[in-house]
Image (cartoon, helix red, strand yellow):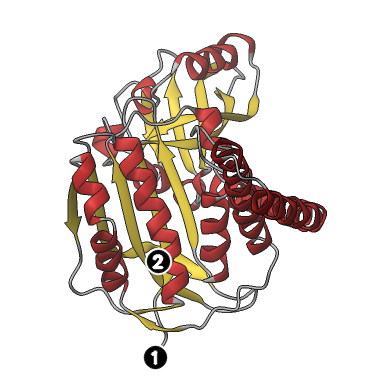
Amino acid sequence: MYENAFSSLIDALLLVSRDGIVLKSNPAAWEMFRRSPDALESHPIADLFPDPADVECRIEGALTAGESYSDLECLAHRNPGGPAFPAGLTISPLLGKRGDCQGAVVMVKDLSLLKELEEGSRQVSTLSTAETLALRMAHEIRNPLGGIRGAAQLLGQELTDFDQREYLDVVIAEVDRINRMVEQMMQLTRPAGATFKETNIHKVLTDIILLEKDDLARRKNRVEQVYDPSLPPIEADQDQLKQVFLNLIKNAAEASGKKGRIQILTRVNSGYGIKTRPQGRTRQGVVVEIIDSGTGMDAETLKNVFTPFFTTKKKGTGLGLALSLKIVENHSGKIKITSEKGLGTTVQVLLPIRQR
């Protein structure tokens, strides 16, 4: 019965000796760490964590003081040298029949999905707050802007001095720029008004590359397109998606700098389902990945990329990614950004496959 219970747990369970060697593991551990029992057992538990010091310290506490720890968050390796994933650990002493401590019991929970859900919730909350702010600001800003522009135009008609009229042209141009920003703010609050129809995502991407051809050539960017020819059509508003991918590809080009490389990949996503309605059934999706060769982002910048008006660009408005997220959310999709300083940035856009 104990053996069956051990094997039936959905979280990874590891029995660890006093010297930190994994003695026994359950099937959930083999699946989580993508290793065979032989590759897990008789090996140090430290091999499973990129920064094992804290884990080893807690195990030592369980061994020497009989202490138990729960909700310890750290990073763990899927497989040797592979990417890390967020994990939650529970560590307890492994007691023998006489109550003596023979080792430690380590339970590992994969927190990847939970972290993604938390991040998605934070993005939606940020957008909701921004929508309210944008609506109030837009109404307060647009009326005086119209007055400033009209007065500048009238004054320009009265002036004969070319230099003075040139200053007024700058005023009008800046007013128009602010108006465009206000218009973008309004897009965060307006209903999407999308026209959904069968869309070939490869055509959308090809049109954008063609549109940006001169700009990419001027930067001497190298664009690598790796498209899955078997990709099914999606259900989307083609014009709105063009706005999303135009923004993302422009960002990738700017981040990569001159002679930088941009990779655009498409594939069917078998590991992620998109739930289009609260009670609806999960639908498979397609993934578009845009990978740049830039310097990447630090954790604080990455945390704020979808926050309206947050930007690291000198002339940026900080609304491009917020609007892109809004559009993709309206398509029942998802945007996921991963980045690391010195290693570039990867943007994944997940969109549901068209239902037949």
Q: Secondary structure at mark 1?
A: loop
- Going 34% across and 20% down the picture, which residue do you hit? 44
Q: Amino acid at mark 2?
A: Lys
Sequence order check, earlier mark of 1 and 2: 2
Question: Residue 356: which numbered mark, if any?
Answer: 1
Observer-nearest residue: 150 or 52?
A: 150
Observer-nearest residue: 268 or 65?
A: 268
Q: How many discs mark residues in the rendered view?
A: 2
- Going 30% across and 41% down the picture, which residue do you hit? 292
Alpha-carbon neighbours of circle 1 within 10 Å: few (<14), some, or many (≥20)? Answer: few
Asked if the residue under mark 2 is in contact with the one under mark 1, i.e. CB atoms within 8 Å, the reply is: no
In the shown orientation, is residue 29 left or right of residue 225? right
Above or below, 48 against 256 in this view is above
Instruction: Choose mark 1 or mark 2, whichever is in front.
Output: 2
Observer-nearest residue: 194 or 298?
A: 194
In the shown orientation, is residue 144 left or right of residue 292? right
Disc 1 from disc 2: Cα separation: 23 Å
**Picture quadrant where residue 171 is located:** top right
